[in-house]
Image (cartoon, helix red, strand yellow):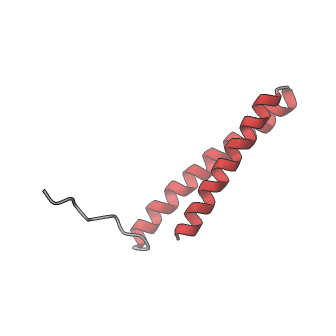
Amino acid sequence: MKYIVILIIVLILVALGRALIAMLRGGADNSEKMFKSLATRVALSIFLFLLVMFAGYMGWIEPNTNLPIR
């Protein structure tokens, strides 16, 4: 599960980097590339959030219950 999460985070960063490159190059054609990259990043972020919520519901991951001792 953690490898899937790491892969999705890397894909989010790649999409963000592609949007940055398109923004720096400018122009109308690159504007559409930037929009598509940012839309991909948002979609991947929402998918990651839903995946983590579903994994918690199914019991595939568990919250950290270790509380600090005072």
**In the image, 27: left or right of 8?**
right
Badge count? 0
Q: Residue furthest top?
A: 27
> In the drawing, does residue 47 fall left or right of residue 24?
left
Q: Where does the image place residue 19, in percent across and percent down from the top left? A: 73, 38
Residue located at (61% from left, 45% from top): 42
How far across and down, in percent of the image, does residue 15 sit?
70, 46
Q: Residue at x 34, y 64 (%)?
A: 63
Q: Measured along the vertical axis of the image, is residue 37 above or below residue 44?
A: above
Q: Residue at x 25, y 65 (%)?
A: 66
- 29 vs 51: above or below: above
Residue 9: name its quadrant.
bottom right
Point out the residue furthest to the front here: 70
Query: In the image, 13: left or right of 46?
Result: right
Toward the viewer: 19 or 36?
19
Q: Name the quarter where the C terminus is drawn.
A: bottom left
User: What is the x, y in percent for residue 60?
Assistant: 44, 73
Q: Would you identify the image quadrant in which residue 36 lies?
A: top right
Residue farthest left in this picture: 70
| Relative to 58, residue 44 above or below | above
Q: Quadrant of residue 62?
A: bottom left
Residue 43 position, x and y percent, is: 62, 49
Q: Nearer the viewer, residue 15 or 55?
A: 15
